[in-house]
Amino acid sequence: MIRPVLRMGDPRLLQKSAPVKAFGTPELQELLADMRDTMAHLNGAGLAAPQIGVGLRVVIFGVTSNPRYPDIEPVPDTVLINPKLTPLSEEEEEGWEGCLSVPGMRGWVPRFKRLRYSGFDEAGKKFQRDVEGFHARVVQHEVDHLDGVLYPMRIRDMTKFGFNEELFPDRELPPED
Ligand code: NI
């Protein structure tokens, strides 16, 4: 079921979410189905459970390659539950981000360039991946949602925060997450 996405200003987006304790339950399956439906409906790159008002440490993300934005690398469709992030170097990289909870805007956000993420899939199986670049950025953006952090809170140069049409008048932008 497509669920409404909370927008910045809703206090539920600022709360710290709780770990999932039981896997393979109908409740978790329904949550994931709703998150997938909602993300697909909005053409999103990712979605965190608190964005639909559920305070659990569950995120989904995935981006298929698209010739309309060739500088964005594809990211496999992933369900990540109770995630843990470990930067693999101090190195940061800045890049544009958008968010379904801050629709129609983009901001220039620093993130760790390379990191390891670990967590559980929907069946409760543990996995980990070492990633970099756009994939690493998407994961950091989603996991921030679980700690009540929205990307505008991480922008250092507020002159690089604005509406899509004003910042990028002639460009098709990659999906929000
Ligand atoms: Ni977001």
Image: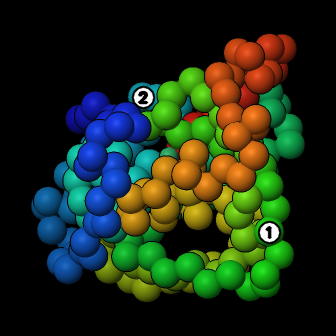
Foreground label between 1 and 2: 1
Residue 78 placement (x, y as % from top left): 51, 61
Q: Which mark is residue 92?
A: 1
The N terminus, quarter of image: top left
Q: Is residue 67 above or below residue 36?
A: above
Residue 33 horizontal side relative to residue 175, left or right = left
Q: Is residue 16 visible?
A: yes
Q: CA distance from mark 1 to mark 2?
A: 32 Å
Q: Which residue appears at 67% of the width and 59% of the height? A: 137
Of 41 and 57, which appears nearest the observer? Answer: 57
Q: Which mark is residue 41?
A: 2
Of 55 and 162, which appears nearest the observer? Answer: 162
Residue 93 placement (x, y as % from top left): 82, 62
Q: Is residue 124 above or below residue 2?
A: below
User: Assess mark 1: CB under 8 A from ligand 1?
Assistant: no
- As helix, strand or loop, the secondary structure at mark 1 comes to strand
Q: Amino acid at mark 1?
A: Glu
Q: Which residue appears at 23% of the width and 53% of the height? A: 54
Q: Is residue 27 above or below residue 41?
A: below
Q: Amino acid at mark 2?
A: His
